[in-house]
Image (cartoon, helix red, strand yellow):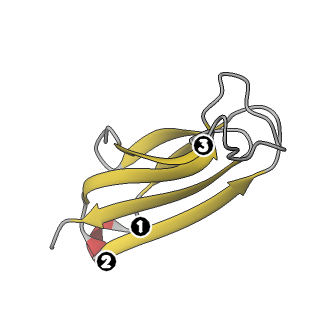
Amino acid sequence: MTKRSASAESIPHPISRKSASPSREAFGTMAKAESLVVGDTNTVPDSEAMNLPDDPHRVSTQGKNLVLSGNTFDYGFAPFSITLLEIQLARR
């Protein structure tokens, strides 16, 4: 089973959140998790960022595996980004 959660951030600073999986009894434990983020690759994100001929990869998609700790994990949402968290739940 897969749990998906999406977030769109429109503020200029990161947001940190702690997340927990649904009830272990009902859904099992988290097996793995990954994030897919569409956002500005500049070191100082800009709400008006866009891809241009001289900077065609300014806004791009980046994926990474998340480190799980039991049935929780911390995640920092990047400013001015769209994030999809995908959590694979182990079979019970």
Q: Which residue is located at x 67 percent, y 43 percent?
A: 53
Q: Give the SS element for disc 2.
A: helix
Mark 2 vs mark 1, CA separation in Å: 8 Å
Query: Residue farthest to the top?
Result: 43
What amino acid is at disc 1? Answer: Pro
Residue 56 image label: 3
Residue 22 image label: 1
- Nearer the observer, 28 or 77: 77
What amino acid is at disc 2? Answer: Ala
Quarter of the image that includes the N terminus = bottom left
Residue 82 image label: none
Q: Marks 1 and 2: in contact by CB < 8 Å? A: yes
The answer to whether residue 7 is above or below residue 14 is below
- Quadrant housing residue 82: bottom right
Query: Residue farthest to the front?
Result: 53
Q: Which residue is located at x 84 percent, y 44 percent?
A: 48
What amino acid is at disc 3? Answer: Pro
Q: Marks 2 and 3: in contact by CB < 8 Å? A: no
Residue at which label 2 appears: 26
Q: Position of residue 86 (x, y in %)?
A: 40, 62
Mark 1 vs mark 3, CA separation in Å: 40 Å
Within 10 Å of disc 3 (Cα), the crowding (few <14, some 14-19, many 20+) is: few
User: Which of disc 3 and disc 1 is earlier in sequence?
Assistant: 1
Q: Which residue is located at x 69 percent, y 33 percent?
A: 14
